[in-house]
Image (cartoon, grey):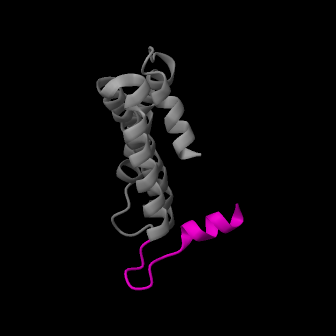
C-alpha cells in the first residue's frame, strides 16, 4: 500500500505534474463510464455520474472555503476583512450543507449508488 501511494505521488520530471495519479484517475473514470451503463442503462448512468460530480464539486467548494479561511487568517494583510475572509466563506459552506444532506438522504433507486460511489471515490 505504501508503495502504491509513493507511486501515485510521483511527478513528471519535466512538467512537474502528478502523472501517475492522473493516469490512475483517468483509468478509473473510464472504467466507471464503460461499466456503469451495463446494469443501469445509459440514461441512469449519466444521472448517477452527474450526481457524483455534483457531490464532489460541493465537497471541493466547501473544503476550499475552509482552506481560504485558514489562509486568510495566516496571511493577514492590509486588505483583511472579517466579513469577506471569514463570514462569507462560512455562509457559503453552510448554504451547501442542504445539498449534501439531500444527496445522501432522499436519493431514490436507481440513483442511490451515486452518493455511495462518491464516498468510495473519495476514500
In the image, is residue 64 above or below residue 98? below
Q: Where is residue 120 in the image (x, y as percent from the top left)?
A: 56, 40
Question: Is residue 20 among the parts visible in the rendering?
Answer: yes
Q: Where is residue 117 in the image (x, y as percent from the top left)?
A: 51, 35
Nearest the viewer among 99 and 46 is: 46
Q: Give the range drawn in magenta.
A: 1-17
Question: Is residue 87 among the parts visible in the rendering?
Answer: no
Q: Residue shown at 49%/63% (left/top)? A: 21
Determine which quarter of the picture holds residue 42: top left
Count of numbered labels shown in the rendering = 0
Q: Quadrant of the N terminus?
A: bottom right
The residue positioned farthest toward the front in the image shown: 38
Nearest the viewer among 7 and 106 is: 7
Nearest the viewer among 89 and 117 is: 117
Nearest the viewer among 37 and 87 is: 37
The residue positioned farthest toward the bottom in the image shown: 14
Q: Residue shown at 39%/48% (left/top)? A: 30
Query: Is 34 placed left or right of 113 in the picture?
Result: left
| Magenta stretch: includes residue 7 | yes
Q: Residue shown at 55%/66% (left/top)? A: 8
Q: Residue shown at 59%/46% (left/top)? A: 123
Query: Is 66 placed left or right of 48 in the picture?
Result: right
In the image, is residue 30 above or below residue 43? below
The residue positioned farthest toward the left in the image shown: 43
| Magenta stretch: includes residue 29 | no
Q: Where is residue 55 in the image (x, y as percent from the top left)?
A: 42, 36
Determine which quarter of the picture holds residue 13: bottom left
The residue positioned farthest toward the right in the image shown: 2
Q: Where is residue 71 in the image (x, y as percent from the top left)?
A: 47, 62
Amino acid at each position: 500500500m505504501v508503495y502504491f501511494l509513493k507511486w501515485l505521488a510521483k511527478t513528471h520530471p519535466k512538467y512537474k505534474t502528478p502523472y501517475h495519479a492522473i493516469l490512475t484517475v483517468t483509468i478509473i473514470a473510464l472504467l466507471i463510464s464503460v461499466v456503469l451503463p451495463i446494469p443501469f442503462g445509459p440514461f441512469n448512468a449519466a444521472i448517477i455520474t452527474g450526481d457524483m460530480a455534483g457531490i464532489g464539486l460541493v465537497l471541493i467548494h466547501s473544503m476550499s472555503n475552509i482552506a481560504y479561511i485558514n489562509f486568510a487568517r495566516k496571511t493577514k494583510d492590509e486588505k483583511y476583512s472579517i466579513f469577506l475572509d471569514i463570514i462569507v466563506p462560512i455562509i457559503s459552506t453552510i448554504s451547501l450543507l442542504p445539498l449534501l444532506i439531500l444527496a445522501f438522504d432522499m436519493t431514490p433507486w436507481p440513483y442511490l449508488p451515486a452518493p455511495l460511489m462518491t464516498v468510495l471515490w473519495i476514500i
